[in-house]
Image (cartoon, coloured by chain):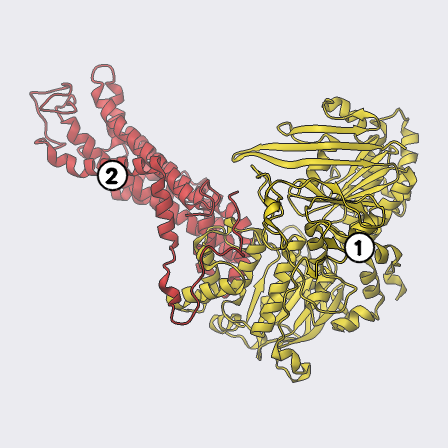
Amino acid sequence: MSDMIDPQVHEKELEFEPGNEPAARKRMSKWTLYSRRFLRNKPAVVGIFIFLLLVAFAIVGPMMTEYDHIDMDFLNLSTGPSAEHWFGTNASGNDNFAQVSIGLQRSLMIAVTVSVGVTALSAVIGTAAAYFGGWTERTILLIIHFLMVVPSFLILAMISNDSGGDWRVIAFLMIFVVGWFFPARVIWTMALSLREREYVHAARYMGVRGFRIVLRHLLPNIGSLLVINFTLGIVSAVMTETGLSFLGFGVKIPDVSLGALIGSGANTITSAPWLFYFPAAALTLLTVSMALVADGLRDALDPTSAAGGRA
Amino acid sequence: MSPVLSVKDLKVSFPSEAGRGDAVRGVTFDLEAGKTLGIVGESGSGKSVTSLAIMGLLDENARITGSIIYDGMELLGKSDKQLSAIRGNGMSMIFQDPLTSLTPVFTIGDQLVEALTVHRKMDKQESWNRSIELLEAVGIPNPERRMKAFPHEFSGGMRQRVVIAIAMANNPKLIIADEPTTALDVTIQAQVLDVAQKAQDETGAAMIMITHDMGVVARTADDVLVMYAGKPVEMAPAHELFHKTRMPYSIGLLGAIPRVDKKEKQPLIPIQGNPPLLIGLPDECPFADRCPIAIPECRASEPALLPVDTGTGGNHLAACIRKHEISDGGRIGNGTVYPIPEQLESELTLTPREERPVVLEVRNLTKTFPLLKGAFLKRKVGEVRAVKGVSFDVREGETMAIVGESGSGKTTTLLQIMDFEKQADGDIIIAGTSVNDIKSGKQERLLRRDIQIVFQDPMGALDPRMTVADIIAEPLQAIGTNRGDANRRVDELMDLVGLDPAHSDRFPQAFSGGQRQRIGIARALSTSPKLIALDEPVSALDVSIQAGVINLLDELKAKLGVSYLFVAHDLSVVRHIADRVAVMYKGDFVEHGDVDDVFDNPQHPYTKSLLSAIPVPDPDIERGRERIIFDPDNI
């Protein structure tokens, strides 16, 4: 633990004489404090940087080449990286660079949407169930337990196939059918012990509304878990989508995703390794950057981390 | 006579991330058979580490130097196996928490028999009979039957008796008691101390009594060792230490304790500041930062523990370079070592009680818990009456205290009031509004302004994820105060409770226990409530810190005219702080009235026994006192 503050030792004489405006001193808000602590963490900043680069690549990439991801160059079938095709081409003559950038775009959209959605939904539902108790809790748990026995991956595969592989349908299903209930149940058990904490009672006795207590006191105190859930959620969303695409139920040709690219690239790893390595590198960078950011976030938000209670 | 235990220059240090932490920095004492040494100090002073070092129970990464000679044998350097032959045999220990120091899956009898047979060859029948004898000795009724009972079938006090029985099983030469009564109620504490005394008399063992309670020391110890920052700062026979104190820290400790037998309401004398961190201590008096009579020479080097002549010829040691200037009663020169804080008089105390407005009125408050049976459809088979219709009122600017032991229903009463629980046959009226009239959430929130609460545990009551400013401003936000006003109020409140407003953007972790409790008080004050409910607000704090918080509460009452509803088990604190007191026993008030009336002239036998059980920090008074045992069947 860092050294204590002595209440009797005032660092400077404070302003309570009349005429001296008490509000003149600016108090750091929680958010400036968090961002300051986050930015001091070098790996986390690197993570943010990588993530922004990937986003830029996914947006700007398709405009940089003369080939679209569905254009086929019949003069270059399965050729390696060259000046014309930076990441090489596949057996149909599609430009790998365009495909990776578009695939990354799709995967990013699915993964980030799903992960944010799942984390937010499970956190609110799980903590609300724990805090409110009674029939709210019983109903939510009933739904969770029901969803646990439903073969959700099958439902996901069937409906996404029907929708023709639209990524929005897939993301929606991954949040509401596959994703939220397991984390929600874990969060519920953790929040059960938080519910009995004195600061939660204190807030209730202050007249703070129930839902506000959930958002202000319960959620932040399981913050570390949420951050980890979020990072792992990104990875698992890409994995689920990859699995779907691999089985032929995910994103459909001519649309591409990182999962579909890695799936087909893995088949040609000896004859055309570039088809595997480029999308795999993009996926690795995405997960690594997320892990670094999550680590930084956790340390910045966590009051017991090395920074102590200080700024 | 050669001493049973002789400790020379014992030093213990632990590795930590910030460097080596010196938990014990040179303890020396001799202990003779049949004598009791009391080791007192606040948390972190190294008293428990000292006892664990003697028992050889410290973690392997601890570095221990010096010498511990027990019964002619050097203990340091012995292997765990060699020590096991001594532990529980010649040397035994009574731990603080009786709830966890017995194995829950074995019967009491099994555990006693194990303690006996592990060290000596005894057949089953013999050890069983001896166990029954031991249980009888520590005052457990029906020992034959109780041998087959499991620990959870015993109350806390009974379990501690069993632990004492195990400790005396092998006629030890040394018993180490580490805060043996801290987890127990006062009446039970008195009984357990008596049993421990009996165990010592029967076995003729030497005893080390480790405690933070000066009253317990006054009652049990022959010699007292006061520890501070890992080092003994004063050592003397009990009488000497309490009456001819020479080290400013010991004087401060004694001055900081409220007394149950003293009527006058002088402010307590807190010791300023916090104990130092035990990592890389500079070579200076560790108490210099907190000492009111520190002089530059105090920082030259750390003073050694040297004899001081008090005129009685007793063996009195103190570690202070000004010890010869200090005279009895904590005086130095023409003044006192500690400046006596000024007492604030409020105008309200001048108004007679009957003319002041009623802030809280409770009529016939009842709480029952249903007893349910059945796995699926729960049937009500009966009920437990936790609170049996209590009535009282709290007037403006006064402190009403509810005292009682654990399970008496005092906290339930408090929570009923805080929950605004609608009463079928009674009423709770807060500042003129009856909770039975509350129809909407808005009305309820409006009423919350007038009543706020401070909790016992300063760690648990503050959200670790919020800055102090947000914590204090939370009640203000709940009633819709705008941000700017709330911020100004936070600075004002922090100043009021003695914290530096510049620290308001830190998290609660950066503050010590006493400071956190001040933050809790600031939060409760933020809406300018008429009544603050205090649920054991100082029981988790060290005495020197506790005094500061008690003084703060007194001061706030005088300054702001706020009323307190104070729930506590510590009668000394209640006597000091309260104007009116109600003694609660099994869900009912057995006595209720003016604090001095109740304490000086108790009517009910339960109150009498409670008052007689509280140790007084004065060995002369404490040893002459008679305990009144309350027997509920005899009223």
For the view shown, which residue lies furthest in the bottom direction? B355
Q: Which residue is mark 1?
A: B243
Q: Quick check: marks 2 and 1 in contact, CB under 8 Å?
A: no
- The residue depicted at 81 percent of the width and 62 percent of the height is B611
Q: Which residue is mark 2?
A: A52
- Which chain is in yellow here? B
Q: Residue B498: which quarter of the image?
A: bottom right
Question: B461 left or right of B119?
Answer: left
- Which chain is in red here? A
Q: Using the image, determine if residue A279 lies above or below residue B521.
A: above
> Residue B438, percent across and down?
53, 75
| A125 or B195, nearer to the observer | B195
Question: A240 left or right of A217?
Answer: left
Query: Count the marks: how many?
Result: 2
> What residue type is disc 1 on?
His
Q: Residues within 10 Å of mark 1 (few under 14, many from 20)?
A: some
Chain of the residue displaying label 2:
A
> Residue A225, percent across and down?
45, 42
> Residue B281, percent across and down?
58, 39
Chain of the residue displaying label 1:
B
